[in-house]
Image: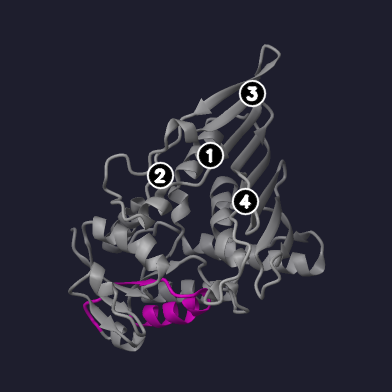
Amino acid sequence: MSRTIKTGIIGYGKSAKIFHVPLLKAMDGFEVRSVLQRTKNDSKLDFPDVKIMRDMKDLLKDDQLDLVIITTPNHHHFDQAFEALNADKHVVIEKPFTVTSDGAEKLIRLAKSKKRILTVYQNRRWDADFLTVKKVIKQKLTGDIVEFESFYNRFRNYLREDAWKEKDLPGSGILYDLSPHLIDQVLLLFGEPEQIFADIRAQRDGDADDWFEINLYYPAFKVKLKAGMLVPEPSPRFVVRGKKGTFVKFGLDRQEKDLDAGKNPLDEGWGVESAEDYGILYKEKDGDIVEEKIVSERGNYLQFYEKLKFSVENFREPPVSPETAKKGIKIIEKAIESNQEGRILDLRF
């Protein structure tokens, strides 16, 4: 039976305002009842009737609260999720799940013992480009895969003084910021890799890493994941190489940009890419290399909350399994170890 899921939001920065609030406002079945803000009150602009709390313990005392969404800096995720689960709330954690795989395992065990839903906001499972790559692989358009590359590049050649992600804090840096997206997508496509080699650097001489390359080894092919902050030129988002051809996709999914611009995810055409943004399949025909545009799948971040609503109401599998998210954190830990030791490491899950 459908009911309203009374929801609390922990933290009200960019993550909450851009990636969660517009979706919650568009969805039927969620009521944002309270927000934890230490000093500001701007959540009232989005939810005039919301209760603003200054202390998490006060927020969690509300017996009517069903769900807590944690959007705070990464090093707070474990402690806040632990508190929320102990208060018998369902929990959504903004990626990355936790800073350590041991912390992830503790939260998974606690959620099971409390019979509560625990999930991680891996929204880029519902990117148009990733959904298109899934289609290309499922339909074997490139033949058997021999190489897979995924890039997430940006350009900002200076450091921000007020950015916690660029401070020397647990879980800061681009590795914990962007690799959870890339790793999660690879785990969905191919399952668990057997080995890893990683190179992680601070190219802007800051306190936190701002560039990485992670190589994941499978029995029949290799995966390369790469991201950096000093890449002004266009670079592909995905490259799928196979024995029959290669699929190349440029450009990032437009949903983040549209959410930031205040567009409504219920608008017609939401998540639909234009033809000029379609990826290209390169293959051989009659001795020549020919190009074929592959129509992009429709992206839709709302599906996370649609699946979450069903999970909470029926106590079914969440939209993102915390077990998969834990594997992603384990890969990050192994990437750090590989970088420190300068060698390929076996992965044990």
Identify the secondary structure beneath mark 1.
helix
Q: Position of residue 296 (x, y in %)?
A: 45, 35
Q: Are marks 4 and 2 in contact (CB under 8 Å)?
A: no
- Sequence order check, earlier mark of 3 and 1: 1
Q: CA distance from mark 4 to mark 1?
A: 24 Å
Give the extent of the magenta segment: 62-87
**Pair 4/1: label in front:** 4
Residue 299 marker: 2
Residue at position x 48%, y 64% in the image: 322
Q: Which residue is mark 3?
A: 283
Residue 86 belongs to the span the image colors magenta: yes
* Identity, as a three-letter code, of the amino acid under mark 4: Pro
- Sequence order check, earlier mark of 3 and 2: 3
Residue 133 marker: 1
Residue 325 marker: none
Residue 234 belongs to the span the image colors magenta: no
**Within 10 angstroms of label 4, few (less than 14), some, or many (20 or more) residues?**
few
Q: Which residue is mark 4?
A: 232
- Sequence order check, earlier mark of 4 and 2: 4
Q: Position of residue 106 (x, y in %)?
A: 51, 77
